[in-house]
Every structure is written in C-alpha cells, then in structure tokens.
Amino acid sequence: MRVLCAAACLCLAVLLAARPALADQSISVSAINLGMAGEDDFYAGQIVVRYHPVYWESDIPWMITVRSLDADLGMSGDGSYIKPLADLQWKLSDENQWIAMRQDEEEVDSSSDTGSGAVTMDFRALLNWKRDRPGDYRATLRFTITGQ
Amino acid sequence: MPMSGNRLARSLAQFACIAALLVFIGLPAWADSEDDPDFYLSVPGVRALKLDRTSLQFTPGAQEMEAGWTQQQVLLARVSANVEWALKLSGTVGQWEGPWDKPVGDIHWKCGGGGYTALTLTEAVAAEGGPCNQQTVPLHFRIRLDWANDTPGEYTYSYILIEVTQP
C-alpha cells in the first residue's frame, strides 16, 4: 500500500512540476461607434468604421473570437422596426470578405505569436432607405481570446 | 463494510493519477474582453433629393407664341428617404430677368395628372410619400407666352427652389 501511495504521489509531483504555468491572456476592445448615418451613407448602403484595434496579450499561441450578446441591434425610435443583427458586419482590416455578426462565436484571427499586439478590424452597418427608420441601434459584443 | 488497505491504496492511487492528469491537461486558457464593447449606430430621419438636371431651356417659336404656351419640359426629381417626405417647390423672386419684368407666375408646373399650377413665392407640395429609395417624381414645366409683352430677348429665371422636407 505504501508503495502504491508513494508512486501516486511521485507521479503527481512529477506531473505538477512538468505542467507549464497557467497561461496569461487578456483582450481589450473599445466601443465601436459608427456615429450618425447620413445621406451619403444611405446612398452607399453602409456606414463603416475602419482599423478598430483589438488589443491582445498572450503567452501562448492564441485565437480571438467574437460574438454578439444581443439577438438584434434594437428597435427603431417609433418601435416599428427591429434592425437585424446581421446588419452589423465585420472583417479583418486587411481582408475583403465581410462576415455578418452572429450570437455564435466566429474566429477573428489566430497566431502562434506571443506577447502583446493588436488586430485591426473593420465594422460596418448596412443601411437601407426603406427599412431603417430613425433610432439608436446598439449591440454588446464579446471578444474572447483562447489558447490554441 | 470498511475498505481493505490495498483497495484504499488503489483508490488513492487512481485518484492521484486522475487528479494529476486533470491538472496536467488543465482547463483551456481563455479570457473575455475586459469590458464587452458596445456597438452604436444612430440613424436620424434622412431625406435626400437628386435632380436629373439643374436648368431647363425653352426656345419658343411662332406656333408656341400662337398657342400662348411653350412646349412642356420634364425635370425628374429622385427622392430617397427613410421617413415621410414632401416634395415642395416655390419661386424665389417675383420676376424674371430680361427685357421686361415677366412675372414668376408665368412659370407653370404640374406633377402627375391634373392641371398646371402657376409658380408662386409660396411653397407648394408637388408630391408626398413614405420611405423610398430614389423614387422618381416627374415635374412638368411650361411657360406662359404673351405676344403683347414678351418682346424678343433672353429671359432667365433663377431660381426655382425644389426641396424635400417633412410633410
């Protein structure tokens, strides 16, 4: 019995010693304010914010994801219209393909780089003359950094 | 029934190994954004107007002088709005520039069916509508002619104010 206990304790000690330290990761993103839509934005069908920084720190290879905590972008001032979440779209600034925001996590970027840095993202809201009644639209986003 | 020594030792060993394995594998590392950022967009009521041209030119001949009217010309207004709108037009000065003080009321207009209306310095509603994307509103113009007063020359009227506003 003593032998078994000793073996188990030794095994535990070895594994604990071999285990890497807890990963240190953080992510920080400021509010994304697209401002007030105007005539030109409506004609363009969108209002865009470019190069919005997503600051990360990680001492292990990482992946950043984003999702919305809200199911939609809220209701128009007169209550007649709910702007769909998919009208908010994002992409990495150096890419071309816009991706509709969802409540499910979507991978934004990943890297084996460690330390700290920033990923720049573009955000846009689609605008439609016939649908988008006046109002203040918003959604809360969650960015997550995970170890790969 | 009390556990035998060997069984207890085996259980302890198993527990230690499982615990060690869990500690070794660990939970995946992750972190959420410190303050979940909000996305904001403010959409005001927006009304916009585009005209297919900015001037109309009439060159009446004898036949039109005889009829008392120029031929009509059409200016296309394209309205876009995310709220209710009204297309309004008015004159800005009382007379034309030219050989004589031809009155603003010699400019007549209509929108859609119905008869022509004399342009005045007071806003008149040509059309109304709800949210739309480049809805075309044709504005027809013609000029009243008068043998007695309209002596030969260049007549200019600047400007007719055409605007899209709230109804």
Image (tube, grey):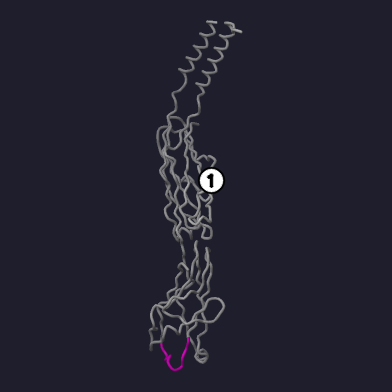
Count how many numbered circles sit on residues in the image. Answer: 1
Q: Residue furthest bottom?
A: B148
Residue at (46% x, 33% y) in the render: B31
Residue marked by disc 1: A71
Q: Tell me residue A123's x, y (percent).
A: 46, 48
Question: Dot 1: within a 10 Å radius of its alpha carbon, few (fewer than 14), some, or many (20 or more) residues?
Answer: some
Q: Tell me residue A71's x, y (percent).
A: 53, 45
- Give, as a three-letter code, the residue at label 1: Ala
Magenta span of residues = B144-153
Q: Residue furthest right?
A: B1
B109 or A14: nearer the viewer: B109
Residue at (42% x, 77% y) in the render: B122
Q: Is residue A47 above or below residue B132?
A: above
Q: Secondary structure at mark 1?
A: loop
Q: Residue furthest front?
A: B1
Name the main secondary structure of what is drawn in magenta.
Answer: loop
Q: Tell me residue A53's x, y (percent).
A: 41, 43
Chain identifier of the residue bearing label 1 in the image: A
B151 falls in the magenta region? yes
Q: Is residue B2 above or below residue B123?
A: above
B71 falls in the magenta region? no
A55 or B161: nearer the viewer: B161
A117 or A32: nearer the viewer: A32
Task: Locate the N terminus of chain B and report the quarter of the image it occupies.
Answer: top right
Q: Tell me residue B43's x, y (percent).
A: 46, 56
Residue at (53% x, 69% y) in the render: B136
Quarter of the rendering containing residue B93:
bottom left
B143 or B115: nearer the viewer: B115
Q: Is residue A93 above or below residue B66?
A: above
